[in-house]
Amino acid sequence: MTGTMKAIRQHAFGGPDVLRWEDAPKPAPGPDELGIRVVAAGLNPPDWYLRDGYRSLPPDWRPEGRFPLILGTDVSGVVETVGPKVAGFAPGDEVYAMVRFPEGMMGQAMAHAQFVAVPAAQVGRKPAGLGHVEAAGAPMSLLTAWQFLVDLGHDAANPFQPHPHAPVPLQGRRVLVNGAAGGVGHLALQVAKAQGARVIAVASGRHGPLLRDLGADEVVDYSRARAEDLHRDLDLVMDCVGGAGAARFLPALRPGGALFIVNPLGFEAHDAAARRGVTVSSTQVRSNGAQLDAAAGLLSDGRVRIVIDSVFPAAEAARAHRRAAEGHIGGKIVLTMPEA
């Protein structure tokens, strides 16, 4: 560690009020790492789950507290220092990254701070023309959509199933995205469109105009109709809500179709899917700077946009977490960091 910085820390698990904007040791990058001055940081579900101690999990699965804890994985900022084993980056470069996920998901990423040390392989160059707020909202959600729909990008064991996840061809296919207004959903919609799919977006009716603007060919308001009653013979359902309820989409898929579930916990209809000839698959998103670079062109030319739900100063992180708890998030919640 070298010097101090400001960070959002907590000294116990609990609600948003446990978060404190306070002094913390500044990390020293390793030889294969970059030291990044954080301009903006994204807020994702793992952040508020960990803040609360993963109370939704069985007691034996919950993490032990290692306090003080700094949350966060998604950042956009400026390279300050470059490790001696790193090539291709220089101080002053504008970059974005998802830091140490999933290996750092229990708080080792420490990205909700003014500075963060990041393995260079996890860092991409911030897309041209994209602001730091939008770039900070991208990494976890964009990589999730990319690894589900375009390229898995790694050979790590799948924690949710015995076989690797495999994306399917999307050109000319009919794809339904459930939870299409959320952080992952609005990017899955756009990535599928960029891959040539016809996309049906399922979300609250108030998000209809936005989803059409993002390229949805059809929008289903889940409060007025059941998408699975309106459609049959779909090629793919990308369920960004997931859980046991994902089984309701099986009748809407053609034999040979696929159901991709972002959150597969609780899904138990594998036998029913096999009888229908439907592939059910999931994966866990992983940090990947090369994929962030591969997607950068889509962000730069506007084919994929990052929708921002709300922005909060880092010192008001508790407000950002309360916004997340309200639900019905349209896009991403982002924290902005003051200059050191």
Image (cartoon, helix red, strand yellow):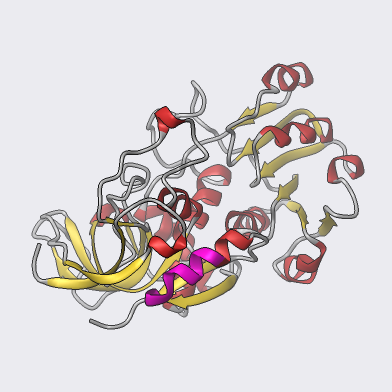
Vertically, is 237 above or below 74?
above
Q: Is residue 127 visible?
A: no
For the point 52% across and 39% down, the residue is 56
Q: Position of residue 69 (x, y in %)?
A: 29, 55
Measured along the vertical axis of the image, is residue 237 above or below residue 194? above
Q: Which residues are magenta?
A: 314-322
Q: Is residue 316 magenta?
A: yes
Q: Nearer the viewer, residue 61 or 152?
A: 61
Question: Residue 23: where, in percent of width, then height?
Answer: 21, 71
Q: On the rendered structure, is 88 left or right of 3? A: right
Q: Quadrant of the N terminus?
A: bottom left
Q: Residue at x 38, y 74 (%)?
A: 314
Is residue 113 in sight in this rendering? yes
Residue 6, picture quadrant: bottom left
Q: Is residue 122 left or right of residue 178?
A: left
Depth check: give the residue in front, 185 or 129: 185
The dominant secondary structure in magenta is helix
Viewer-nearest residue: 68 or 143? 68
The residue depicted at 39 percent of the width and 38 percent of the height is: 154
Residue at point 25% right, 51% down?
Answer: 67
Left or right? Give the position of 276 relative to 62.
right
**Which quarter of the rendering shows the C terminus?**
bottom left
Q: Is residue 145 magenta?
A: no
Q: How many badges with numbers are in the image?
A: 0
Residue 156, position as x, y percentages in the image = 37, 32
Q: Quadrant of residue 70?
A: bottom left
Q: Position of residue 264 (x, y in %)?
A: 59, 34
